[in-house]
Amino acid sequence: MFEMTLSNWWACWWLLVLVVVLVLVVVLVLVVVLVLVVVLMLVLMLMLMLVLVLVLVLVLVLVLNCSSEPSRINN
C-alpha cells in the first residue's frame, strides 16, 4: 500500500499550490486580454462613429454649398 509520509504530503501540497497559482495566473491573463479586446473594440467603434459623423457633416456641407450655388448664379 502507498504510505503518505510527511515529505510526500508536503510535495503534494506544494504541487496543489502550484496548480492553483498557475490556474489563477491563466484566468487573470485571460480576463486582462478579454478586457483589452473589449476596450479596443469600443475604441474602434467610437473612431468609426466619429469618422461616419465627420463624413456626414462634410457631405451635408458640400450638398448645402452645391444647392446654394445655383441660387447665387440665378441672382
Image (cartoon, grey):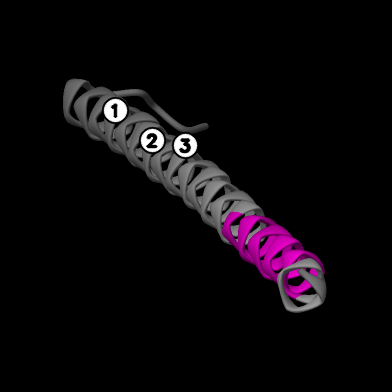
Magenta residues, start to end = 54-69
Looking at the rendered structure, the kind of residue marked 2 is Leu
User: 71 or 59: nearer the eye?
Assistant: 71
Task: Tell me what residue is drawn at x 55 percent, y 43 percent.
Answer: 42
Q: What secondary structure is found at the residue carrying circle 3?
A: helix
Q: Do the numbered discs 3 and 2 sit on residues whose CB atoms are within 8 Å? A: yes
Check residue 60 for magenta coloring.
yes
User: 63 or 39: nearer the eye?
Assistant: 63
User: 9 or 54: nearer the eye?
Assistant: 54
Quadrant where the C terminus lies? Answer: bottom right
Q: Is residue 26 above or below residue 20?
A: below
User: Magenta span: helix, strand or loop, mainly?
Assistant: helix
Q: Residues within 10 Å of mark 1 (few under 14, many from 20)?
A: few
In the picture provided, is 9 more to the left or to the right than 64?
A: left
Looking at the rendered structure, the kind of residue marked 3 is Val
Task: Tell me what residue is drawn at x 23 percent, y 31 percent.
Answer: 14
* Residue underneath mark 2: 28
Query: Label 3 to label 1, Cα distance in Å?
Result: 21 Å
* Residue underneath mark 1: 17
| Rendered image quadrant of residue 5 | top left
* Residue underneath mark 3: 31
Task: Tell me what residue is drawn at x 82 percent, y 74 percent.
Answer: 74
